[in-house]
Amino acid sequence: MKLNSIRVKMILILIPLVIIPILLVGIAGTLFYRDVIRDNIWDDNLGQAKALSAYIDTRLDYSTLYLDSLASRPLVISDLENNKSTVLNLTLEFASENTDFDTMYAVSPDGTIVSSYPDTGMLGKRVDKPFVGDVTGMSRYTGGPFINETGEPVIILAVPVAGQNNTSLGTIAGEISTDTLRAELFSTQTRYNQYVYMVNSTGHIIVHSNRSFMTAVKDYSSVPAVREVMRGNTGIIEQHNLIENDQRLAAYSIVPGAGWGIVIAVPIDVAYQPIYESTYMFAAVTLALAAITALIAILLGNYLVRPITGILMATRKMADGADYQQFLPVGRDDELGELARSFDDMSRQITSDRARIVDEKNRAELYVDVMGHDINNLNQAALASLELIRDDPGLTMEERESIDSAMAAVNGSAGIIDNVRKIQRINEEKLDVIPEDLDRLLQASIDEMPRPKGKNVVINYRPAQGRMVNGNPLLKEAFANLIGNAIKYSGDEVTIDVSIERAEKTGRPYYDVIIADNGYGIPDDVKPRLFRRFQRGTTKARGKGLGLYIVRSLVEKLGGSVSVENRVPGDYRKGSKFIVSLPAREERTDGNDLR
């Protein structure tokens, strides 16, 4: 399908008309819903962070209440008042075995551990822990993370044991492994569990997907979301995490009772995946609609242009001589139907004219065959008879000149017949084209060229081998014609320069065969029509006016050109220069011809 066809042009007009509005609506919808989806992502992540912080706050509160229930038991109070440990040991063992406290402690007001379960080897030793001073001051304590005696990170919850008059008798404390909190957080229904972490009030890691950060109590206080939590804020931001060196969407929420914070820091490409998916979906839907409308436009364009293409197909079929009428929309009542009927009438006339032309062509070819065979035979018989008569020694000079004149006339007639047959061969639909060596053709033309008596003919030619063109055996006769004309239309001293030069024309290589003479020359007003049929120069030399026409016809049939110019620019009397330009037939590196 050609780009400049009516069908293509109509389709190219229809497609933008229907596709551009769809694309504009699709782009606008995509931009609008991108913002909507982005807001939903932010709200969803922030809601999850708040839910996790509320869960941790409630979970710590329940654990602290359980410790309160232990600290308020009379037997526990009695053991601490009387410096005993029987009930304390049983109570701590029961609590450790049945709750998520890994280790339980009972501590006196001066910080001495009076009971623990399991046995940590710390009985009777004083501990310098923040919860001792805080709790003995009659306040609850939630802190950590700490690295315990076994090297594991834990958080500690502690409550005071109050005696009479609300005096402090000591502390009940419990350790909870941060691994326990980690497992609980990661077992929730949060979408991005692997990106959740929890920090304490100083910005140090309590829970993280990378456990090495937990054992190292990694300092995250430089992270923007963590700094906001340390200030007691709740929100969501896009941040660059210097520690993990990536861009993340971080939702953060404070754990009120402990001063800790929950952060859900999701990589940007993961967090905004719904935006990308919706964009792809909108793009796919838009492209699908565009494709459907393009198909409709193509079908509509084909429907509108089909009658025109039918007429076009009819013209091609008519040119091939096939049945074309089946393609013509002659039954239509509109302008296209009228055009089809006019075309049908015209094609019938053309068919009739073509048949007449074929008849005339066959008749002309018959005449040429008769002239080329029968008349030529008569000429040869007449020429043979004249030659016999001319050899009679009894002829007078006047009679001999008359016979020479008659023989010249017969030879001229044979030349005309030969030229006509050459024209017929050149004008055949397919001329035989074979590789020809210009050097060989020129050498043969020069060697076979007769030198007239009374003329001193010098032909200068430097051999140039390997100048291959797509030629024909008649090409040698074309060169011979040009060289013969140079001799014929010159004085007694004839100098002809023949050369081959390489040239570039329209981006491809050519060979220019240049034949320059010092003859009478050709006036500038004659040059434009010199190669026409029956056109002769202004000299008195005899000729039929067909030679140069044959040269031009042959060269153009081979894809070349022929021209004439003055040998000396500006002075036609100093001789002429004929230039025959033919496309070069080059050899490829693999040995095959480049045509």
Image (cartoon, rainbow, N blue to C red):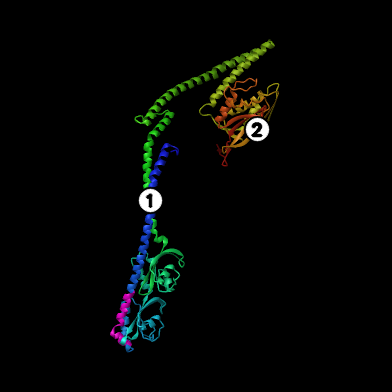
Is 68 one of the magenta-colored residues?
yes
Give the x, y percent position of residue 591.
Answer: 57, 40
Which labelled disc corresponds to residue 499?
A: 2
Q: Main secondary structure of the magenta part?
A: helix
| Tag nearer the camera, 1 or 2 | 1
Residue placed most toward the observer, 587 or 502 = 502
Q: Is residue 185 above or below residue 7?
A: below
Name which quarter of the figure residue 80 lies in.
bottom left
Asked if residue 328 can be seen in this view, the reply is no
Residue type highlighted by circle 2: Ser
Name which quarter of the figure residue 250 lies in.
bottom left
Distance Cα–Cα, label 1 vs label 2? 70 Å
Residue placed most toward the observer, 105 or 277 = 277
Give the x, y percent position of residue 395.
Answer: 68, 10
Name which quarter of the figure residue 583 lies in.
top right
Residue at left 41%, top 38%? 7
Residue 239 lies left or right of residue 450; in this view the side is left
The boundaries of the magenta stretch are 60-80
Is 313 one of the magenta-colored residues?
no
Which labelled disc corresponds to residue 26?
A: 1
If you read the primary sequence from the N terminus, does the residue marked by circle 1 or circle 2 appear first? 1
Which labelled disc corresponds to residue 316?
A: none
Residue placed most toward the observer, 106 or 405 = 106
